[in-house]
Amino acid sequence: MDGDEMAIESIYVPHKYYVDEATGVVYAYPEDGSQDSFIGNNLREMSAEEIVAHFNPQPRFWTDGITLIFSAASIILGMRLATQEEIAQLLPAMKLREAAEKISGLRQVADQAIAPLQDAVDIDEATPEEVAALTAWKKFRVALIRLPEQQGYPDEVVWPLPPA
């Protein structure tokens, strides 16, 4: 063994993993038993499959019974894994909410770009480039406003590109 391997081996401490069933929080303790006295009665030792899933989370749907969230997080406080029935029931509202949030964010970008350009036009100090940019940003903003009218919205959205 060379020096690098020895350094890595001396740093690595194997762990055993426990989960708090009430919160989903995961705790790691050294396998040597040196901290076993800190393992609470509310913790359950995790299986090898659970540990692999914890370190390699797959995106899943989470819910509080009202809202649906798609995330690879191993836990979202206040949420639990959604059942197939809840996913079917709440997915349309989630897609609508996500599309509306994206439109709102893009509208803010457009509004911030338009304001100074419009000021320059309003006081007759706009350059031809600023007038062209203002027109492009206004067309982008109008396209955003019209997105809900698209066929297939919010499941299939053709997003307009912001001006360069």
Image (cartoon, rainbow, N blue to C red):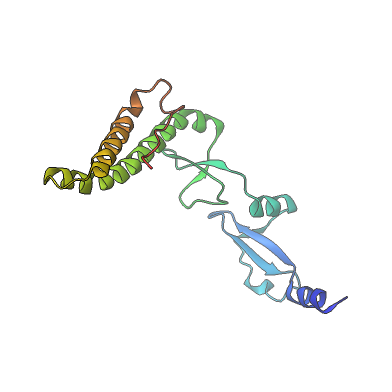
**Hey, which residue is sitting farthest front in the picture?**
128
| Image location (x, y in percent) of residue 156 | 46, 27
| Image location (x, y in percent) of residue 28 | 65, 65
In the picture provided, is 33 more to the left or to the right than 92? right
Q: Name the one closer to the observer, 151 or 77.
A: 151
Asked which quadrant contains residue 146, the reply is top left
Vertical position of residue 54 compared to residue 12: above or below: above
Q: Name the one closer to the observer, 2 or 56.
A: 2
Quarter holding the N terminus is bottom right
**Hey, which residue is sitting farthest right in the picture?**
1
In the picture provided, is 108 more to the left or to the right than 77? left
Residue for point 72% across, 53% down = 47
Quarter holding the C terminus is top left
In the picture provided, is 36 more to the left or to the right than 117? right
**Hey, which residue is sitting farthest left in the picture?**
123
Q: Name the one closer to the observer, 107 or 9.
A: 107
| Image location (x, y in percent) of residue 52 | 70, 52
Vertical position of residue 96 compared to residue 79: above or below: above
Residue for point 53% across, 55% down = 23
Q: Name the one closer to the observer, 106 or 83.
A: 106
Residue for point 46% across, 28% down = 89
Vertical position of residue 23 compared to residue 151: above or below: below
| Image location (x, y in percent) of residue 136 | 30, 36
Residue for point 56% across, 54% down = 24
Asked which quadrant contains residue 59, the reply is top right
